[in-house]
């Protein structure tokens, strides 16, 4: 039902007392290696909820690539579309200081080699999906090829495109026009709005209206503990979150978007899908980590 096209990274995490300055070496904690990357996270989030999920991504022919394939398979993701080789697996080098602040260096590696040709070669995978979910940790021309494939697969019967513009980048008009919805947080919304005065307002309704004017069929703005705002041409609805004890918000947006893509794929309307996704996002912040923190459908229902 859901095809995620996106990144897969190994997150290499070391706790430090403080960050090294230029030319300096500091000692840190033991290394922790976690599967991550927005594409891989979204696919795991959806599959853990019970979604039939496939991932189109590229990893290296190395230990990190095998870790990522293993975590996808363990969650039940169809990995036939995961391409192997071309460059080392993408890596995020993360140092965490005692106050919990991160410093992150990302090496995109194989993610940067996921090409428009890879998308075209996966035409069957795209055509058989109800929803295709994409983020921006892969090349923009690859994202554009996904939008093009969704468009040519055709309107009502073809798949629906869910796009999370993260990390934020300017999007071509034809990519924006294919989004239904564009899913983004406050930071991403303000980035995309750029010089638009709506971006300087404090009201998410103003961001959503200004973003809708750029062509997407619908917009979902995630608001952390505030839940999410859903907007299309007909109406704008604020869906509140659940009050939870937030432990670690890493991956909350990916859990939200994976859940949203699944529910849209099985036929929910956008508002209903967002009401479910908000509960999944809330559950994900109650546990540490990204993929490790994603709930099952039973856990969501129990809240
Ligand atoms: P991102 O992780 O991309 O910055 P948000 O912080 O907006 O995205 O979180 C995505 C979703 O996760 C929210 O819409 C909400 O459903 C849930 N969420 C995030 N933080 C909290 C929180 N502190 N309490 C409850 N739900 C949260």
Image (cartoon, rainbow, N blue to C red):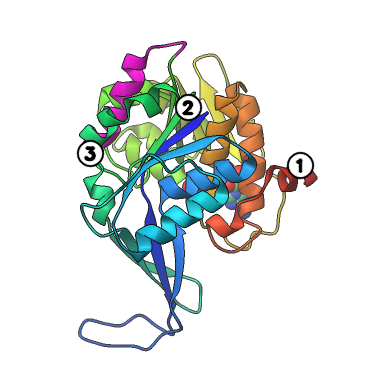
Q: Distance between the residues labelled 3 and 2?
A: 20 Å
Indicate whether residue 148 is drawn in magenta. yes
Tell me, for residue 225, which label it has, or none. none
Extent of the magenta region: 141-157
Q: Do callouts 3 and 2 mark residues in contact (Cβ within 8 Å)?
A: no
Please, what secondary structure does the residue beneath circle 2 have? strand
Q: Provide the residue designation for mark 1.
A: 301
Rendered location of residue 270, percent (x, y): 58, 24
The reply to whether residue 13 is in sight is yes
Q: Residues within 10 Å of mark 2 (few under 14, many from 20)?
A: many
Please, what secondary structure does the residue beneath circle 3 have? loop
Identify the residue shown where x is 28% and y is 32%. Answer: 119
Q: Provide the residue designation for mark 2.
A: 131
The secondary structure making up most of the magenta span is helix
Pick the residue in front: 189 or 251: 251
Ligand 1 contact, mark 1 (Cβ < 8 Å): no
Question: Number of labelled discs?
Answer: 3
């Amino acid at each position: 039902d859901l095809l995620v096209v996106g990144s897969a990274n190994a997150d290499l995490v070391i706790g430090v007392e403080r960050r090294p300055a230029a030319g300096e070496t500091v000692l840190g904690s033991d290394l922790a290696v976690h599967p991550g990357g927005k594409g891989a996270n979204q696919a795991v989030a959806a599959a853990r909820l019970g979604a039939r999920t496939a991932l189109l991504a590229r990893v290296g022919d190395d230990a990190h690539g095998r870790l990522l394939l293993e975590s996808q398979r363990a969650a039940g993701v169809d990995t036939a579309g995961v391409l192997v080789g071309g460059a080392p697996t993408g890596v995020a080098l993360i140092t965490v200081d005692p106050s919990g602040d991160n410093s992150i260096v990302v090496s995109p590696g194989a993610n940067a080699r996921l090409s428009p040709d890879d998308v075209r070669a996966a035409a069957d995978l795209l055509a058989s999906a109800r929803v295709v979910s994409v983020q921006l940790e892969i090349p923009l021309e690859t994202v554009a090829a996904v939008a093009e494939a969704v468009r040519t697969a055709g309107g009502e019967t073809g798949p629906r495109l869910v796009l999370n513009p993260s990390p934020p980048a300017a999007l071509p008009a034809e990519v924006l026009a294919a989004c239904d919805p564009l899913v983004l947080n406050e930071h991403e919304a303000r980035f995309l709005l750029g010089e638009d005065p709506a971006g300087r307002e404090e009201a998410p309704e103003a961001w959503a209206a200004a973003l809708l004017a750029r062509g997407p069929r619908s917009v979902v703005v995630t608001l952390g503990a505030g839940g999410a705002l859903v907007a299309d041409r007909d109406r704008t609805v604020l869906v509140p979150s659940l009050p939870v004890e937030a432990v670690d918000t890493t991956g909350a947006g990916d859990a939200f978007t994976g859940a949203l893509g699944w529910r849209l794929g099985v036929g929910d309307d956008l508002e209903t899908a967002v009401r479910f996704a908000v509960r999944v996002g809330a559950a994900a912040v109650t546990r540490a980590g990204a993929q490790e923190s994603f709930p099952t459908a039973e856990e969501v229902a129990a809240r």
